[in-house]
Image (spheres, grey):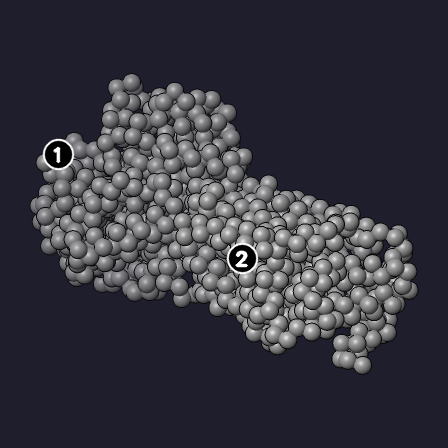
């Protein structure tokens, strides 16, 4: 389960719609970190993440068209077009495929990612020019994606287990009351020391993320906007803007044509399958 | 009563209100100095539309800024791959991410090296965990590292004894904010350096890079302005007190100097001129002329006091005798400085204007405040001794008796010295900015001799094909250019994305070395770039080599043993090669090194040209003031010769000269013109108004102005000699050159000028009395 790019950045336990396994996981994790037992803010932060994840679970599969608008140094806008397919997986992170449409040189190039709740994600790349699927591993995917201000890390599935949480305070974004939750990546290879997330109190949608770099300076901010509800339940943004505070550059990611429950099967999300996608 | 006498009467009789009133106006103007702001960085040297600056800014906007800190790590035992040393490099790499304003960190350890296992590709750091490597693994790392062209000559020496961790900084801010940011980053880096050196005594660790250069420059400039400048000031005042034999006179001079500087800097503040490394010389320039004005007036005043004149008469006489020459030197020198506005570099225009205002300020203070001071300050009268017991009388007799010999000897020596000038190479050596006591000097030397080079050229090469950088022909041309660069003896490293593409091509073909070549098609190149981009960590991305649009690549070359001229010539040679061999590319070298080299050279040229022009303007003023073409022309020689002689001597001794050369003319202009003008004015008065013959006039001039001229020269030369101990080469060289120029000027004015005047007396003055 889980969508990847959608703003709801669901923090959700694998394919479960009730609290029990979550509480079990929570209790277990607290057991290993007795020092934080007393910290109510940690519990509250975790609970917010879990609730957001719960609300976003159960969509089955989805597809979305992406347009990436990168503002270049010369002021020109560079456009990249992609499609993304996501398949919810019970008890583990989502599987997703990103297919490139534009620029033409990249047409048909596809990335298959298996997100895992623990351990490194797995990734395969189909290169049409070579007609080969290659399995790619790298410890750290925090570099900029296609010259944009987004890192691949920012775009991949945000499993609850990938962070440690702490509720900080209440705040409002454009008049919408939000929880401010700090999350710290569990992976020591992350490009970030921490992220501050703003989650609205009504629908548990992500409204803003501040990313702090390795020296704990504010690096960039992401704002999802234009939320719409699909299937009477799942909120998805129409746009995300990532602004780099250190370079002054920004990238806009537009989402269109959301489709849910298209009948995607597990067999569509395999290394050999991505060689056949057009 | 003549206008001069009326003016003097006014100044003396009404000093009681003129001095306080003017003091108020002066202080109001001087209040502007409190608004002065510092500007730093080399950008202040450029006009906003300077093509070098625009090219550099374009590259920095596209690929990130060039500012960096370089940890230079040398293994004492000669092997940076020894386990302890690799661990140290890894620790420095990791800690370097914490340096304030850091943007990326590149080292031997985090160098991205794709590894292949069938259809599995792992993209990771060359050394992922230094502490856990086996002996065989280390040997493998060593073998790979030393074969990587992007590493060797940049982050790793060919023999594996020296390595470097490069920290790129994001210093987009300006002015004081930038200075603070640099200081923060450097301070943090120094702490890392210290910890690492303590933890591993087998390593020598140095710090280099642009941020270190700027920070060191700021530190030595601060040291100079906090210790050397005040020391210079103290020495000048002590000598003045000694030579004038009057502490009070010395105190009057201090007040005059301070008020004059206040006028110049107050103007700068009101005019919103930022203080930078060039126009910061203005107070020193103003000081020289303020001292000269003061000494002339005070020396006559003190002499009259000793001759038992009453206070008021002494002030009156001193003003009457000096008003004309002081006015003339001030106005001409000010016009000379204003002519520096012809420079195309803003700081030099500002220096000219501030100095001109200050010089006029010195005149203003000398005429309005100084008389008041002379009237009320407690001077001890009648010590019965002249201010400086130089045997001016005997000297003049000597010069008069041997004037033919002196004329030809001094002329011959002058011409001999000047004849060396064509050999003088104007050059800036960035490896030689700081004295050996400065740690950065060691770092620069190690980088130059044992690791890499200290100069870089960056090329942003745009692809004309719509497929952008993936176009195979474009990539082939860029790779050819990179190969040519690598083949040049000056070049020690070339960083270019085509190397990465070759490596990826091999990796995607089961690591078959036969595929270590550029991809065959644009699609392939684009897909490789995508593969690479989604696999790399924060701070090691390709945005420093490929622009966001994927339409241009950056090629960076590191050069060694190059001074400014060499770098400029190399850039021209490279451009020519590109035009002839890869005509589809446009490759203009840019970056801080070449910008600095070009602006440095142009500063030297525009400063020398501006100063020469100033001397011509001054001569024109003399022609008008003397109402005599001949006198004006004569004044040209003693004004021009001193600096030329010194440049000639320097050429014979050192052969080349840095930016210091450019300031010598302007720093000495005021004092040199002062010497010759006072001499000429007195001589002309004696010859024409007092009906003396040439011999008598020379004699009279020596006795009346000789002591004052020699005093000011000794005082100022001694003052500037203090600067020789500066750790900043431009300051120490210019201190020496200025002191030398002042000495040459006074010698020429006392030997060459009088003998010349006697030689050409019949031509100069048609109707001898």
In the rendered image, the vertical position of residue A144 relative to residue B351, given as above or below: above
B631 horizontally vs A138: left or right: right
- Whole-percent x, y for residue B143 in the image: 24, 26
Q: Residue furthest top?
A: B135
The answer to the question of whether label 1 and label 2 lie on touching residues, with beta carbons closer than 8 A, is no
Number of marks drawn: 2
In the rendered image, the vertical position of residue B55 relative to residue B222, given as above or below: below
Mark 2 = which residue?
A: B641
Report which quarter residue B266 is drawn in.
bottom right
Number of the label disc, if any, that sits on residue B513: 1
Q: Chain for mark 1?
A: B
Instruction: Evaluate whether residue B138 shows in this view.
Output: yes
| The one of B430 and B366 positioned closer to us in this rendering | B366
- Whole-percent x, y for residue B470 in the image: 17, 53
| The one of B376 and B747 positioned closer to us in this rendering | B747
Point out the image quarter for the N terminus of chain B. bottom right
| The one of B77 and A15 positioned closer to us in this rendering | B77
Instruction: Evaluate whether residue B40 shows in this view.
Output: no
Q: Residue at 24% of width from left, 42% of height from top?
A: B488
For mark 1, does the 10 Å Cα neighbourhood hold few (<14), some (14 to 19), or many (20 or more) residues?
A: few
Q: Residue at 55% of width from left, 65% of height from top?
A: B636
Q: Residue at 83% of width from left, 58% of height from top?
A: B302
Q: Residue furthest bottom?
A: B1
In the rendered image, the vertical position of residue B99 relative to residue B253, given as above or below: above
Please, what secondary structure does the residue beneath circle 2 have? Answer: helix
| The one of B502 and A241 positioned closer to us in this rendering | B502
């Amino acid at each position: 389960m889980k969508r990847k790019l959608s703003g709801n950045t669901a923090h959700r336990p694998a394919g479960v719609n009730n609290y029990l396994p979550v509480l079990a996981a929570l209790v277990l994790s607290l057991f290993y970190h007795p020092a934080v037992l007393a910290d109510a803010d940690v519990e509250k932060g975790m609970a917010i993440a879990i609730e957001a994840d719960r609300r976003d679970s159960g969509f089955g599969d989805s597809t979305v068209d992406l347009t990436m608008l990168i503002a270049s140094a010369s002021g020109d806008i560079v456009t990249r077009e992609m499609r993304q397919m996501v398949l919810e997986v019970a008890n583990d992170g989502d599987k997703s495929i990103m297919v490139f449409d534009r620029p033409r040189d990249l047409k048909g190039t596809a990335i298959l990612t298996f997100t895992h709740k623990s351990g490194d994600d797995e990734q395969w790349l189909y290169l049409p020019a070579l007609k080969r699927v290659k399995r790619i591993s790298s410890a750290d995917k925090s570099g900029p994606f296609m010259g944009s201000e987004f890192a691949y890390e920012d775009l991949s599935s945000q499993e609850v287990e990938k962070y440690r949480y702490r509720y900080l305070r209440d705040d409002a974004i454009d008049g919408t009351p939000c929880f401010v939750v700090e999350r710290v990546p569990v992976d020591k290879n992350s490009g970030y020391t921490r992220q501050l997330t703003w989650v609205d109190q009504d629908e548990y949608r992500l409204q803003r993320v501040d990313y702090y770099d390795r020296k704990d300076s504010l690096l960039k901010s992401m704002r999802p906007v234009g939320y719409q509800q699909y299937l009477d339940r799942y909120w998805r943004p129409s746009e995300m803007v990532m602004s780099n505070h250190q370079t002054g550059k920004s990238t806009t990611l537009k989402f269109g044509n959301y489709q849910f429950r298209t009948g995607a099967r597990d067999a569509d999300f395999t290394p050999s399958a991505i060689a056949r996608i057009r | 009563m003549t206008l001069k006498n009326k003016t003097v009467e006014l100044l003396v009789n009404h000093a009681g209100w003129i001095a306080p009133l003017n003091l108020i106006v002066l202080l109001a103007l001087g209040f502007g100095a409190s608004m002065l702001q510092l500007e730093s960085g080399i950008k202040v040297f450029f006009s906003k539309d300077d093509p070098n600056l625009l090219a550099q800014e374009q590259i920095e906007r596209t690929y990130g800024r060039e500012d960096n800190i370089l940890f230079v790590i040398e293994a004492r035992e000669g092997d940076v791959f020894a386990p302890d040393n690799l661990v140290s490099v890894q620790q420095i790499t990791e800690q370097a991410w914490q340096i304030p304003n850091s943007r990326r960190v590149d080292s031997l350890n985090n160098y991205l090296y794709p590894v292949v296992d069938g259809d599995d590709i792992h993209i990771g750091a060359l050394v992922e965990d230094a502490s856990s490597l086996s002996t065989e693994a280390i040997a493998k790392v060593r073998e790979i590292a030393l074969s990587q062209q992007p590493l060797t000559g940049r982050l790793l020496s060919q023999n594996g004894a020296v390595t470097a961790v490069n920290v790129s900084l994001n210093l987009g801010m300006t002015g004081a904010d930038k200075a603070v940011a640099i200081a923060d980053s450097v301070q943090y880096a120094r702490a890392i350096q210290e910890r690492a050196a303590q933890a591993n005594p087998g390593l020598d660790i140095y710090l280099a890079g642009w941020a270190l250069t700027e920070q060191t420059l700021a530190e030595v400039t601060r040291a100079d302005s906090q210790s050397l400048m005040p020391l210079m000031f103290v020495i000048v005042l002590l000598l003045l007190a000694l030579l004038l034999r009057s502490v009070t006179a010395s105190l009057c001079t201090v007040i005059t100097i301070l008020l004059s500087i206040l006028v110049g800097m107050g103007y700068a503040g009101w005019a919103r001129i930022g203080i930078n490394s060039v126009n910061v010389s203005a107070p020193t320039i103003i000081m020289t002329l303020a001292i000269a004005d003061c000494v002339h007036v005070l020396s006559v005043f003190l002499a009259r006091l000793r001759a038992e004149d009453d206070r008021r008469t002494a002030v009156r006489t001193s003003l009457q005798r000096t008003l004309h020459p002081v006015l003339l030197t001030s106005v001409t020198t000010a016009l000379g400085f204003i002519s520096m506005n012809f420079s195309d570099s803003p700081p030099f225009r500002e220096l000219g204007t501030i100095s001109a205002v200050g010089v006029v300020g010195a005149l203003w203070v000398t005429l309005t405040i100084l008389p008041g001071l002379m009237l009320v300050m407690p001077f001890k009268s009648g010590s019965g001794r002249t201010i400086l017991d130089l045997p001016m009388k005997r000297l003049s007799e000597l010069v008069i008796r041997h004037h033919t010999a002196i004329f030809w000897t001094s002329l011959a020596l002058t011409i001999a010295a000047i004849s060396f000038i064509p050999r003088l190479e104007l050059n800036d050596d960035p490896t030689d900015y700081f004295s050996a006591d400065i740690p950065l000097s060691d770092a620069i030397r190690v980088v130059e001799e044992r690791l890499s080079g200290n100069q870089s050229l960056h090329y942003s090469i745009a692809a004309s094909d719509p497929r952008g950088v993936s176009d195979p022909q474009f990539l082939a041309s860029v790779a050819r250019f990179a190969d040519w660069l690598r083949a040049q003896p000056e070049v020690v490293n070339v960083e270019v994305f085509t190397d990465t593409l070759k490596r990826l091509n091999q990796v995607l073909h089961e690591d078959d070395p036969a595929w270590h070549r550029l991809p065959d098609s644009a699609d392939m190149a684009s897909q490789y770039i995508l593969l690479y981009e989604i696999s790399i960590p924060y701070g090691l991305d390709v945005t420093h080599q490929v622009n966001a649009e994927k339409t241009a690549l950056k090629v960076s070359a590191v050069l060694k043993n190059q001074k400014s001229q060499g770098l400029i010539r190399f850039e021209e040679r490279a451009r020519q090669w590109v035009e002839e061999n890869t005509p589809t590319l446009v490759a203009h070298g840019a970056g801080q090194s070449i910008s600095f080299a070009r602006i440095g050279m142009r500063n030297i040229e525009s400063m020398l040209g501006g100063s020469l022009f100033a001397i011509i303007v001054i001569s024109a003023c003399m022609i008008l003031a003397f109402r005599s073409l001949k006198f004006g022309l004569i004044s040209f020689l003693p004004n021009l010769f001193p600096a030329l002689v010194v440049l000639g001597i320097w050429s014979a001794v050192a052969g080349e000269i840095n930016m210091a050369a450019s300031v010598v003319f302007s720093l000495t202009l005021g004092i040199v013109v002062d010497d010759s003008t006072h001499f000429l004015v007195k001589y002309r008065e004696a010859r024409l108004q007092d009906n003396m013959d040439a011999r008598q006039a020379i004699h009279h001039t020596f006795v009346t102005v000789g002591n004052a001229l020699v005093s000011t020269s000794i005082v100022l030369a001694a003052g500037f000699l203090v600067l020789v101990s500066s750790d900043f080469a431009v300051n120490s060289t210019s201190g020496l050159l200025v002191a030398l120029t002042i000495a040459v000027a006074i010698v020429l004015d006392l030997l060459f000028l009088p003998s010349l005047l006697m030689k050409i007396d019949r031509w100069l003055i048609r109707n001898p009395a």
